């Protein structure tokens, strides 16, 4: 109920402000699930796709010592979530990843409904990578759920899943890419994409894993599965990372950028509050 109230508050605010370019809005000061970016016209909302609480099992992080795990109080699991992010800017509704899919219990559609949106409202989808808990929500009954959205995916990710991995492990990925074939745009790292979004290389979790930057926000995808463990111990990878050494390098690189430039990060497996200032300006 509380969450629905917050989303309803966002919808009401957008209805009032209209989010027209250059127009200044008041951020929802008390809502940790929504932020207004530095341009003062972009609102980003955390969509919690999982139901209830989510803990990532300690066993997923074998490089973490028992003493560190004990000291951080995460022996029973590391607080996490499965998430997507909804952005509103200049009249466009944008999604970063789409969660697991309603048929598997994903909450994205319910969250969109709560702010008065339908899948047709979404104009753009940016994919951090192709795992099922990020692209599963793009399909419903074997069809493309988002009938209008232009989809942006990294060319390295696309190539890896379509050309390099075995057929039996890429069934969902192939279905999704086929369903959105006419609306998918493959980008290269470093490309500037529509809506003022920059694609940044962060491979390791998957070959084409991508971080997106918009203004002062980094949407870091699956850079961290155990935030409490990995933010300050970046060498610790997760067993879900396909190339652990590369994932650690990317984690270090991206968190360093966030630290040096005083950026806010959000990610698809971060626990609440969904937005985190790595190195707040004094
Ligand atoms: Zn994931």
Image: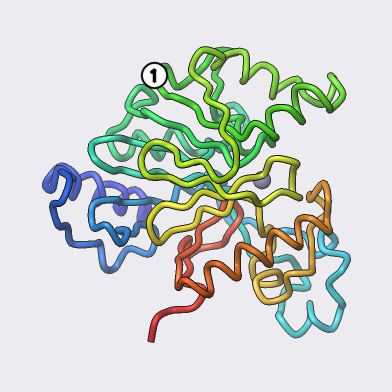
* Quadrant in the picture for the C terminus: bottom left
Q: Nearer the viewer, residue 210 or 173?
A: 210
Point 49% across, 57% down: residue: 218
Query: Where in the figure is residue 209, as x and y percent of width and height?
Result: 67, 44
What residue does disc 1 label?
Answer: 148
Quadrant location, ligand no. 1: top right
Q: Considering only vertical position in the picture, is 64 above or below 5? A: below
- Left or right? Give the position of 171 relative to 254: right
| Residue 51 visible in the displayed image | no
Residue depicted at x 37% and y 29% = 122
59 or 35, which lies in front? 35
Depth order, front residue of 108/190: 190
What residue is shown at x 62% (from left), y 31% (from top)? 104
Rendering quarter of residue 95? top left
Q: Please tell me whether residue 67 is drawn above or below residue 138 in the rendered image.
A: below
- Residue 148 in the image: state x and y as whole percent: 39, 19
Q: Quadrant of residue 150?
A: top left
């Amino acid at each position: 109920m509380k969450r629905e109230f917050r989303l309803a508050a966002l919808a009401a605010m957008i209805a009032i402000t209209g989010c027209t370019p250059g127009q200044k809005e008041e951020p929802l000061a008390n809502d940790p699930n929504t932020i207004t970016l530095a341009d003062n016209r972009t609102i980003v909302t955390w969509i919690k796709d999982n139901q209830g609480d989510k803990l990532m099992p300690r066993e997923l992080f074998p490089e973490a010592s028992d003493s560190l795990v004990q000291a951080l109080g995460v022996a029973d699991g590391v607080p996490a979530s499965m998430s997507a992010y909804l952005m509103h800017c200049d009249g466009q509704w944008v999604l970063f990843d789409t969660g697991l899919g309603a048929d598997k219990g994903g909450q994205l559609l319910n969250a969109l409904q709560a702010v008065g949106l339908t899948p047709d409202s979404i104009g753009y989808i940016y994919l951090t990578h192709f795992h099922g808990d990020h692209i599963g929500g793009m399909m419903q009954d074997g069809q493309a759920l988002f009938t209008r959205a232009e989809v942006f995916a990294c060319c390295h990710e696309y190539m890896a899943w379509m050309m390099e991995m075995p057929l039996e492990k890429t069934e969902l990925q192939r279905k999704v890419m086929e369903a959105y074939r006419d609306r998918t745009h493959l980008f290269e790292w470093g490309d500037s994409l529509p809506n003022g979004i920059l694609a940044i290389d962060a491979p390791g979790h998957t070959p084409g894993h991508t971080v997106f930057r918009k203004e002062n926000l980094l949407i870091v995808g699956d850079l961290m599965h155990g935030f409490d463990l990995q933010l300050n111990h970046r060498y610790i990878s997760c067993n879900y990372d396909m190339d652990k050494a590369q994932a650690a390098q990317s984690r270090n690189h991206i968190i360093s950028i966030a630290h040096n430039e005083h950026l806010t990060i959000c990610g698809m497996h971060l626990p609440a509050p969904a937005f985190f200032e790595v190195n707040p300006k004094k």
